[in-house]
């Protein structure tokens, strides 16, 4: 483990033209302070990943690179979502850095926690999770849905670090491990514990966005949550089997009761109960088919194994030999 490692901040940005002009100074100040104190090497960089923004984000990143060589940029060919953009940045940084820190560009993650992360790294941790100590700045709704989501994931048997999003340090070794995972349905915070190695956590207070708005409306949060569940656990499928078994026993009892009533000769009424049973069973069956269908849909996407991101342009190429930039 180098005592003065090359650190790359990996920062995904999507339509962040109002945020980047404010937060870039935060990152640069931290980077230069760490270089000055000898904690990280002079070759350390801030790598912004433009996730197919439709505003001036890439222009801002290119300008920053021109002004200060510590800024680098990677532009994806289209919007692929936060998780893919982050992966693109990490896999690119892996070629240059000893250690990476992934962080959001909106100033919500406390940049000062990086010093403590580096300390853990130098004590032997290959992965250091940034864990939110307080969620006071999130809305009550977001706080509660997030809590419910972590509980649900745990219940379903998926290993996730509670209250950890994607603010984390990873060594090159851990990144090499991550590059072995080829799945298309990316849920990094569930995959990274599977990489293994010695890990550690540091705690920080999550702040409010410095400007702009969150790109995670409820629909995207739900889709990320669903991706998390289906890519980490097959327990919903097992639960369906259990439910099917339970319903079969109930049905068997119902058949026995019905036959007895018929034999006793008391078979006139029953329209309401009949319809209730039809609706209830129909609903359960369609729901279960839906869950199974979700898994089949995920398998469909996995078997095609399309590229998870395609790089359109980057500022790093000046310093390295050209390479196939479209990674699987
Ligand atoms: N982001 C991205 N691609 C997207 C959506 C978001 O790269 O499609 C980035 C965004 O620029 C930010 C980070 O992911 O740096 C987290 O997004 P945001 O702050 O909107 O989410 P929140 O913090 O509200 O969960
Ligand atoms: Mg944010």
Image (cartoon, helix red, strand yellow):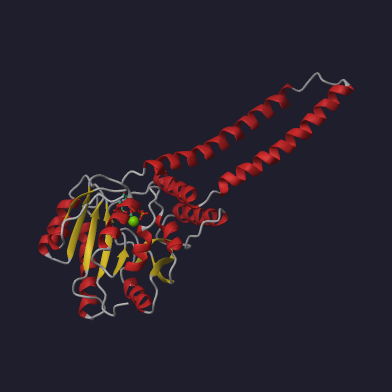
Q: Position of residue 298 (x, y in %)?
A: 44, 42
Q: Position of residue 134 (x, y in %)?
A: 44, 65
Question: From this viewpoint, is residue 120 visible?
Answer: yes
Question: From this viewpoint, is residue 106 visible?
Answer: no
Lateral position of residue 262 relative to residue 54, left or right: right
Q: Position of residue 36 (x, y in %)?
A: 20, 79
Lateral position of residue 46 relative to residue 167, left or right: left
Residue lying furthest top in this view? 268
Quadrant in the rendering for residue 275:
top right
Residue 199 vertical position relative to residue 299 in the rendered view, above or below: below
Lateral position of residue 227 relative to residue 279, left or right: left
Which residue sits at x=18%, y=74%?
42
Count of numbered circles in the view: 0
Which residue sits at x=44%, y=66%?
196
Q: Position of residue 271 (x, y in %)?
A: 73, 21
Between 194 and 45, which is closer to the camera in this rendering? 194
Residue lying furthest right in this view? 264
Lateral position of residue 13 relative to residue 259, left or right: left
- Which quadrant of the rendered structure holds the N terminus? bottom left
Between 8 and 310, which is closer to the camera in this rendering? 310
Quadrant in the rendering for residue 60:
bottom left
Between 224 and 74, which is closer to the camera in this rendering? 74
Which residue sits at x=34%, y=60%?
208
Residue lying furthest left in this view? 66
Quadrant in the rendering for residue 111:
bottom left
């Amino acid at each position: 483990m180098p005592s003065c490692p090359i650190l790359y901040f990996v920062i995904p940005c999507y339509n962040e033209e109002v945020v980047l002009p404010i937060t870039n100074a935060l990152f640069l100040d931290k980077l230069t302070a760490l270089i000055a104190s000898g904690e990280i090497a002079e070759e350390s960089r801030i790598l912004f990943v433009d996730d197919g923004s439709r505003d001036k984000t890439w222009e801002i990143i290119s300008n920053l690179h021109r002004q200060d060589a510590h800024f680098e940029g990677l532009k994806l060919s289209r919007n692929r979502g936060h998780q893919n953009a982050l992966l693109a940045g990490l896999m690119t940084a892996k070629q240059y850095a000893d250690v990476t820190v992934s962080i959001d560009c909106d100033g919500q993650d406390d940049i000062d926690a990086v010093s403590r992360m580096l300390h853990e790294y130098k004590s032997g941790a290959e992965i250091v999770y940034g864990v939110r100590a307080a969620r006071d700045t999130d809305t009550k709704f977001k706080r509660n849905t997030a809590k419910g989501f972590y509980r649900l994931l745990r219940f379903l048997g998926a290993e996730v670090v509670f209250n950890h999003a994607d603010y984390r340090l990873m060594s090159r070794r851990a990144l090499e491990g991550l590059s072995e995972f080829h799945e298309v349905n990316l849920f990094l915070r569930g995959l990274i514990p599977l990489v293994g190695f010695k890990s550690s956590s540091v705690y920080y207070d999550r702040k409010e966005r410095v400007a702009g708005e969150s790109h995670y409306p409820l629909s995207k949060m739900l889709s990320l949550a669903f991706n998390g569940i289906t890519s980490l656990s097959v327990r919903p499928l097992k639960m369906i089997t259990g439910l099917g078994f339970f319903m079969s026993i109930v049905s068997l009892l119902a058949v026995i009761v019905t036959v007895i009533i018929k034999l006793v000769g008391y078979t006139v009424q029953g329209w309401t109960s009949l319809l209730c049973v039809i609706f209830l069973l129909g609903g359960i069956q369609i729901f279960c088919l839906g869950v199974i269908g979700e898994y089949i849909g995920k398998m469909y996407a996995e078997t095609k194994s399309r590229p998870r991101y395609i790089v359109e342009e980057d500022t790093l190429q000046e310093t390295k030999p050209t390479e196939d930039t479209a990674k699987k």
